[in-house]
Amino acid sequence: MRFFSLRTAAFRNLADEEVDVAGRDVFLIGENGQGKTNFLEALYFCSYASSFRSVRDGDLVRTGEKDFSTAATLNDSLYEKVLIKYEGNKKIISIDGKRIEDRKELLSVVSCIVFCHEDMEFVSGSPERRRWFFDQSQSLYDPLYLDDLRRYRRILKTRNAVLKEGYGRPDTTMLDTLDPQMAEYGLKLMKSRAAAAAGFSDTFGPLYEEVSGIAGITVRYIPSWKYQDAEELQDFLRSRREGDAAAGLCLSGPHRDRYIFTRGDAEFSGHASTGQRRLLALLLRSAQARLFSEKTGIHPVLLLDDVLLELDGEKRRRFLLAMPQYNQAFFTFLPEEPYKRYCKSDTLVYQVNAGMIVKM
């Protein structure tokens, strides 16, 4: 599956036009602030109906406008067109003219893996950002995991509401109903996360060594709960109700799980150099793409936003050699970068200037 064309209307600074992107490799050349990343963001929005920049939908509307839309035609896919409109603060998603209500259905249309500066948060940011990355990685190839994650979050939201409403004395009858459900789906998530983290580490560690020369890097999953038995876990939740009620929220559970990067017995990322952390972030995405292909038999579309700029020459060469297989890839470059040396005979090259996308 790959993109054949992209049309946007009032999306950030991009011109209202349709752009041919039928090539396997597409290069976007331009100075900073001209719209290269916005173009990748529009492609990503067609895949997930959300931005990879962690912004609200309303922030994507061009200044002076109220609504926007993105539409993509597809090639080598079961579907021909995705259309997403943002109108009146509501999102309307259509696949081949049929409106869908659940964004989950987009996962079967075209899967994008984005490499961008914000990925540094998965290494240096909060535990929540690392959980988000690994949750996304599993959800891309395991819809059952996504269903369990959604159920757990709904139960957690309801439980937190009960804890807040009680002003320190929550409705124990409601908690007696919610805690078994929380334990059931929490344990499912823990089991799935532990297996997925081990598999991810098996792919990521050798990949990081291949590009950086540093061996022994692993991904370690640390669950918040230490219990594997549902009844013991329910007893634990009951024992923690007083503290949870005082805080007005549940202080333990999969929503507090952690992932860390280790080398030997020591935590690695906190002591790594900026360059090593940046490479960690890049190769997390490479491992994500590799695992997606292994689990689904489908190669993703890669969106690479200025990723080569921050690598030295040797690491850039190694990174390109270790890139995951893909159906299509979009790269952004500054004009002074040696992008021509990476061009193939069929590479599409566009100049991006003030939101205009012009073939070079």
Image (cartoon, rainbow, N blue to C red):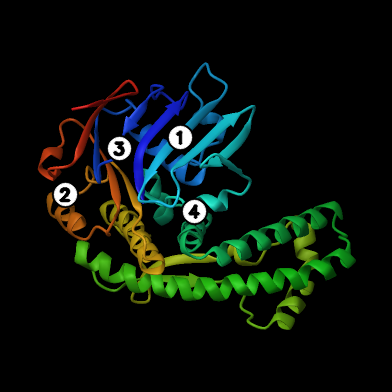
Q: Dot 4: what SS? A: helix
Q: Compare marks 1 and 3 and give the one earlier in the sequence.
A: 3
Q: Residue at x 23, y 68 (%)?
A: 209
Q: Which mark is residue 71?
A: 1
2 vs 1, front mark: 1
Residue 319 lies, in percent from the top left, at: 21, 56
Give the side of residue 158 with respect to residue 222, left or right.
right
Q: Residue at x 71, y 60 (%)?
A: 156
Q: Which residue type carries mark 3?
A: Val
Question: Residue 89 sits in which quadrant?
Answer: top right
Between residue 38 and residue 20, name the one nearer to us.
Answer: 20
3 vs 2, front mark: 3
Task: Look at mark 4 in the image and give the residue it sits on.
Answer: 107
Q: Which residue type carries mark 4?
A: Leu
Q: Compare marks 3 and 4 and give the one earlier in the sequence.
A: 3
Q: Dot 1: what SS? A: strand
Q: Which residue extends farthest top? A: 64
Alpha carbon of mark 2 to alpha carbon of mark 1: how far? 36 Å
Task: Look at mark 3 in the image and give the residue it sits on.
Answer: 21
Residue 169 lies, in percent from the top left, at: 88, 60
Give the side of residue 8 with respect to residue 306, left or right.
right
Would residue 12 be visible to someone looking at this image?
yes
Give the side of residue 260 with respect to residue 307, left or right.
right
Alpha carbon of mark 3 to alpha carbon of mark 4: how far? 20 Å
Alpha carbon of mark 3 to alpha carbon of mark 2: how far? 29 Å
Q: Which residue type carries mark 2?
A: Asp
Q: Dot 2: what SS? A: loop
Q: Residue at x 29, y 40 (%)?
A: 22
Q: Dot 3: what SS? A: loop
Task: Look at mark 2 in the image and give the residue it sits on.
Answer: 312
